[in-house]
Amino acid sequence: LSKRKRWCKPVCVNSEGVINVQNKAKKVLIVEDSQFNIMPIQAKLKRCKIPFDIANNGFMALERYSKAMENGEPYAVILMDLEMPIMDGREATTEIRKLEKDSEYSRAFICGLSAYTGNGIKKECLDYGMDDYLSKPLNMESMMQMITTQFNKLQNCNDCWPGSSFLFFTLLSHRSLVIVR
């Protein structure tokens, strides 16, 4: 079996079988100024058929966030680089949290991203209003587990079996399939 894991799109199991869940809130915003860092995240989300947008700095993230909320297509997860030109991730998170507080916007899950792994970086992210932190280079499995967890929290499928949650299919090889809850 191949040790390389590939995550696929979320599904919800109901009494009639497996159905795809296409919820507008199940969307990711990548906020990163480096194409080198964007490419693997973008590739993974595309393979998993998870909708996403990209912003190259905090100011663009704030604009995209506001527009998405106005269009009724909020982001479930925001992957926020801490160090960017124009507006960094800390300031952008603070502004997003102000928008959420001053309006009827639902709270987005914001995960800080940084190559810096020193003591206190996760606490700093939390202090600025982020919900979690991942260090770069990103471990794609950890990132997908975090996204999966957040999508599961948004689960609102009345047709699902009681206690069911999203299932993510992990392909271990072209012939093997393991279901991870």
Image (tube, rainbow, N blue to C red):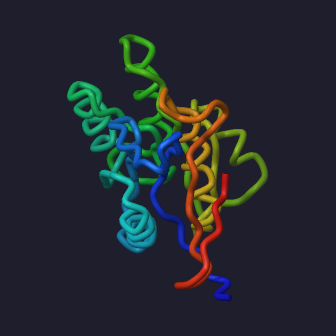
What's the residue at 65%, 68% (across, down)? 178
| Residue 157, percent from left and from top | 48, 31
Please indicate whether residue 19 sits to the left or right of residue 168 in the image: left
In front here: 10 or 38? 10
- Quadrant position of residue 75: top left
Work out whether 154 lies above or below 32: above
- Residue name at image x 23 percent, y 25 percent: 70
Residue 34 appears anywhere in the view: no
Vertical relation: 51 (above or below) 73: below
* Quadrant of the image occupied by residue 168: bottom right
Of 42 and 112, nearer the camera is 42
Residue closest to the far bottom: 1
The quadrant of the rendering that contains the N terminus is bottom right
Q: Residue furthest right?
A: 119
x and y percentages locating residue 74 in the rendered image: 34, 33
How many numbered marks, from 0 up? 0
Q: Is residue 41 above or below residue 145?
A: below
- The reply, left or right, for residue 178 in relation to residue 43 is right
Q: Residue 164 location in percent, x, y?
A: 63, 38
Q: Which residue is at 70% across, 45% downward?
A: 122
Residue at 41%, 74% in the rendered image: 36
Residue 131 seen from this side: yes
Question: Residue 165: percent from the left, percent from the top?
Answer: 60, 41
